[in-house]
Amino acid sequence: MKQENQNMSDAEYREAWDNLGKIEIKLVEKIGECKHIVGETYIYKPPYQKPPNVCYALLHVLDLYPWRVALGFPSWNAQDRKVYRIHCPDATGTVWEMRRVK
């Protein structure tokens, strides 16, 4: 397997990092009790920086996906492969969309 980035300069690496984009999470469906309100939106600035004021249970589930989103890996959502639809861990909780934004 050819490694395309093995000769990347430090400047090219920094440019690639800067171009990762932000990741938006948005509450699109609320089934049961939750402190969050439909339409609320939060931003991961780099994939490592979790947005403040999001419940820890949801962040635990979302932790699996920021790098997939940041790198443009397609989601399982056949209607829009750029959007991940993720349910919080509560059986009657919330559904969130996670996508890369400029």
Image (spheres, helix red, strand yellow):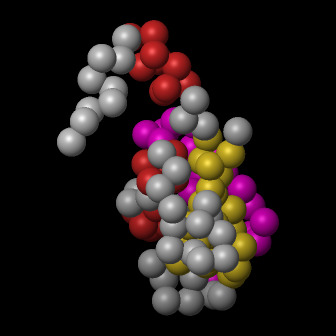
Q: Position of residue 32 (x, y in %)?
A: 63, 87
The residue located at (66%, 69%) in the rendering is 80
Evaluate whether residue 52 shows in this view.
no
Residue 32 in magenta stretch: no
Quarter of the image where one finds residue 3: top left
Could you say which is closer to the camera, residue 61 or residue 93? 61
Residue extending farthest to the left is 1
Q: Nearer the viewer, residue 34 or 12?
A: 12
Please indicate whether residue 23 sits to the left or right of residue 58 in the image: right
The relative height of residue 45 versus residue 51 in the rendered view (above or below) is above
Q: Main secondary structure of the magenta part?
A: loop
What segment carries the magenta color?
33-54
- Left or right, residue 23 beside residue 38: left
Residue plotted at (57% across, 75% down): 77
Q: What's the residue at 66%, 88% (across, down)?
A: 31
Quarter in which the N terminus is drawn: top left
User: What percent of the width, then of the height, locates residue 9?
Assistant: 37, 11
Identify the residue shown where x is 27% and y is 23%.
6
Q: Position of residue 46 (x, y in %)?
A: 52, 36
- State whether residue 19 is above or below residue 12: below
Q: Quadrant of the C terminus?
A: top right
**How many numbered marks, from 0 up?**
0
